[in-house]
Image: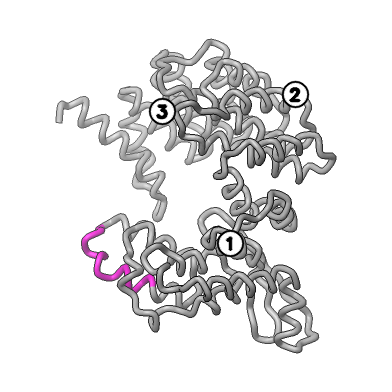
């Protein structure tokens, strides 16, 4: 779908709305959202071409409900209907999907549960029983509808909705982003207090709220920058859980500050590949810097030879898109042209092209056309062609 929408936007412009209504009727919320992001105008769809909002809430798919609450058609739903949808989502949330499914179907058969991708970023569980299939995203739907209605749920309530699920669940993302968007010190202090909580899940939730609070603060004074840098620097030294540590280091990587980079460098040789990948991603945050500090450059060179292919790839991307033109970095990328992993080779081509290194041309030719459906690989390999145009003055 992404490839088709990218290929010829004019050709598909007349079909987006029909595709959107079809996706909604098929309860494919992820596809419906993708179409909206690529220009589908939901207001062109008649109500009878879509599913009822009640059916979407019953389905338990936050992505589907979000598509129906798109700004183009949001006004179709009066406040009274939205309040009813809040009550419906709350009923599912409080009863639990299994209990509500058994009540509605009257079935005592075994419940079938599968993990599904609800949208581009979040997952939910889908339960099948007695001919009905329902996703367990009602807590996330409840959060969305309350926000639309202007109902301010407490920090504790939103955290409880998130912690009832895995961190990849939609309920986490909705709760974290809503709390972070408040950008107030009461929310900040509540999240910061979780740093010493004995349960890693609580610490993880607190770290995410703090991280996004700083990330979303686009005010000139950047009031949360200094507190975030301080708390995450101290937190990294004490954290024992890998998942929480990874998020804390990821938060440090959002700071263009030598203290943040010094902390990241200390974890460049960590035993966990996920931590090392996060370290690589966190280097070079400052857009003004034209070269890496010596300790960061040294760490990146080591990470580019890491045993884990994903770590090598992330380190190479960071070098590729930097403005540091130290020849040792170009040589390190050239060494990855013979890497055992194709994705690493592709990134190395991209990096050499960005660094105006002739070696990218032959390497791109050897790799051949991009893998079908891989927009990222297409972009990276096309970097070599753009280099040739610059080289030849075209």
Label 2 or label 3, whichever lies nearer to me, is: 2
Q: Is residue 327 left or right of residue 303?
A: left
Which residue range is magenta in the image? Answer: 8-20
Which residue appears at 51% of the width and 76% of the height?
53
Which residue appears at 44% of the width and 35% of the height?
347
Residue 260 is tagged as: none
Q: Residue under circle 3?
A: 321
Residue 146 is tagged as: 1
Residue 155 picture location, percent across and down = 69, 49
Taking depth in this image into account, of 137 and 158 the one nearest to the observer is: 158
Q: Residue furthest top?
A: 294
Of callouts 2 and 1, the N-terminal one = 1
| Secondary structure category for the residue under label 1 | helix
Q: Looking at the picture, does residue 259 appear above or below residue 91?
A: above
C-alpha gap between disc 2 and disc 1: 38 Å
Q: Residue under circle 2?
A: 237
Q: How is the image coloured?
A: one colour
Which residue appears at 45% of the width and 73% of the height?
77
Which residue appears at 74% of the width and 58% of the height?
164
| Secondary structure category for the residue under label 2 | helix
Picture quarter containing residue 45?
A: bottom left
Q: Counting other residues with Cα less than 10 Å from the Cα at mark 3, is it few (<14), some (14-19), or many (20 or more)?
A: some
Of callouts 2 and 3, the N-terminal one = 2
Taking depth in this image into account, of 343 and 277 the one nearest to the observer is: 277
């Amino acid at each position: 779908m992404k490839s088709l929408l990218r290929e010829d936007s004019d050709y598909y412009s007349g079909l987006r709305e029909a595709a959107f209504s079809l996706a909604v009727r098929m309860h494919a919320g992820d596809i419906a959202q993708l179409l909206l992001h690529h220009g589908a105008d939901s207001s062109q769809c008649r109500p009878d071409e879509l599913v009822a909002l009640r059916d979407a809430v019953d389905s338990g798919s936050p992505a589907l409900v979000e598509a129906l609450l798109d700004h183009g058609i949001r006004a179709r739903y009066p406040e009274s209907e939205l309040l009813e949808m809040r009550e419906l989502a709350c009923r599912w949330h409080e009863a639990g999907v299994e209990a509500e499914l058994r009540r509605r179907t009257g079935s005592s058969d075994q419940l079938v549960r599968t993990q599904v991708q609800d949208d581009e970023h979040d997952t939910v569980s889908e339960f099948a029983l007695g001919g009905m299939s329902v996703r367990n995203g009602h807590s996330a739907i409840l959060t969305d509808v309350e926000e639309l209605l202007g109902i301010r749920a407490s920090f504790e309530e939103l955290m409880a909705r998130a912690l009832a699920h895995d961190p990849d669940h939609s309920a986490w993302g909705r709760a974290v982003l809503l709390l972070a968007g408040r950008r107030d010190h009461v929310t900040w202090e509540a999240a910061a207090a979780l740093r010493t909580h004995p349960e890693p899940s609580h610490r993880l939730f607190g770290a995410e709220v703090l991280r996004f609070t700083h990330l979303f603060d686009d005010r000139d004074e950047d009031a949360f920058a200094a507190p975030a840098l301080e708390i995450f620097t101290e937190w990294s030294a004490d954290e024992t859980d890998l998942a929480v540590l990874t998020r804390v280091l990821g938060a440090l990587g959002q700071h263009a500050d030598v203290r943040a980079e010094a902390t990241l460098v200390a974890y460049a040789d960590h035993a966990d590949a996920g931590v090392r990948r996060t370290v690589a991603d966190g280097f070079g945050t400052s857009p003004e810097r034209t070269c890496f500090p010596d300790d960061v450059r040294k760490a990146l060179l080591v990470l580019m030879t890491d045993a884990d292919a994903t770590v090598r790839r992330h380190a190479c991307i960071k070098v590729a898109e930097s403005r540091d033109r130290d020849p040792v970095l170009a040589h390190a990328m050239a060494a990855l042209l013979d890497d055992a992993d194709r994705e690493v080779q592709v990134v190395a081509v991209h990096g050499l092209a960005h660094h105006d290194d002739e070696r990218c041309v032959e390497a791109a030719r050897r790799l051949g056309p991009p893998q079908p459906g891989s927009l990222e690989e297409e972009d990276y390999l096309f970097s070599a062609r753009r280099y040739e145009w610059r080289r030849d003055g075209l």
